[in-house]
Amino acid sequence: ACSRKNTRNAALHPLWQSPLTIPGGTRQSPINIQWRDSVYDPFLKPLKISYDPTTCLHIWNNGYSFLVEFDDSADRSIIVGGPLENQYRLKQFHFHWGAINDWGSEHTVDSKFYPAELHLVHWNAVDYPSFEDAVMEGNGLAVIGVFLKLGARHEGLQTLVDALPAVRHKDTVIEFDEFDPSCLIPSCPDYWTYAGSLTTPPLTESVTWIIKKKPIEVDEDQLEAFRMLLFTSDGEEERRMVDNFRPLQPLMNRTVRSSFR
Ligand SMILES: Cc1ccnc(S(N)(=O)=O)n1
Ligand SMILES: [Zn+2]
């Protein structure tokens, strides 16, 4: 008998006991980015990233991923330009990854999965009074997606990896300061952008996605450090935090634009 290709079994994943699809959803994420179908838009500006490392607060295992959260009470860590009408404030960043290196990213490029994907979540504090309000608005959020590929050790990521054992269990938190997440973003300016949604509940259609074309390199030990985290709280039967990605969603009536030819 032929061996069944190792397929991702996201449907049974604890993360997705909630509806896999949103009734009436027309701009859900993640999606496959078909490079040849993306449309170069010469009017797209370069994305300008200005993060203040002292706004970094803590790392928190929320039972889905681990989040690095920032003080977003003022415009101290912001992005502007790119496809965005105004500036957006950094709220948190987190990752999605697989049990093995064959998959783990949420978006794919020409149907290729990366072993992990970084999301830097920003909100539109110009138009909305809080993150919670912005989450409900079509132009409320901007998320930068960065693919992680297996390669050289990433020194900037290592400071984060060294802290992970302290947040192994769900609902644990550790103070984390003086971290500049721009060290996790490739210097190559090229990106794709499209109108989408959050990929974990509440799955609201409020995200302008900015997906960097170039991945960053991380090594096997660093990916393994993600995989030793737990979905479960201390005292519960341990379930390793892996495969915390949402299945691909239909493109429907959307065009993915590229900032590069
Ligand atoms: C803040 C937040 C909530 C839910 N989902 C996401 S994500 N994975 O779309 O970036 N971010
Ligand atoms: Zn995410």
Image (spheres, grey):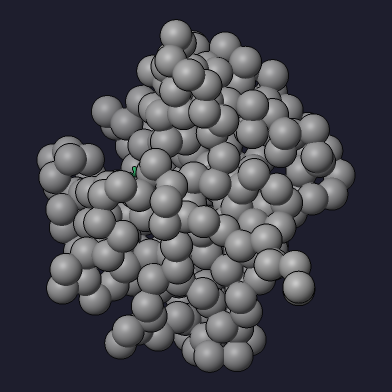
Q: In the rendered view of the protein, which quadrant contains the C terminus?
A: bottom right
The residue lying toward the viewer, choosing from 57 and 248, is 248
x and y, in percent, of residue 157 in the image: 69, 33
Q: Quadrant of residue 34?
A: bottom right
241 vs 152, left or right, is: left
The residue depicted at 43 percent of the width and 15 percent of the height is 236
The residue depicted at 42 percent of the width and 51 percent of the height is 12
x and y, in percent, of residue 201 in the image: 27, 47
x and y, in percent, of residue 61 in the image: 45, 24
Residue extending farthest right: 152
101 vs 147, left or right, is: right
Residue extending farthest front: 1
The residue depicted at 45 percent of the width and 11 percent of the height is 234
Q: Quadrant of residue 84?
A: bottom left
Camera sees residue 182 = yes
In the displayed structure, 1 sits above or below 39; it is: above
The residue depicted at 80 percent of the width and 40 percent of the height is 220
The residue lying toward the viewer, choosing from 170 and 56, is 170
Total numbered labels placed on residues in the image: 0
The residue lying toward the viewer, choosing from 134 and 232, is 232
Camera sees residue 114 = no
116 vs 247, left or right, is: right
259 vs 195, left or right, is: right
Q: In the rendered view of the protein, which quadrant contains the N terminus?
A: bottom right
In the displayed structure, 107 sits above or below 125; it is: below
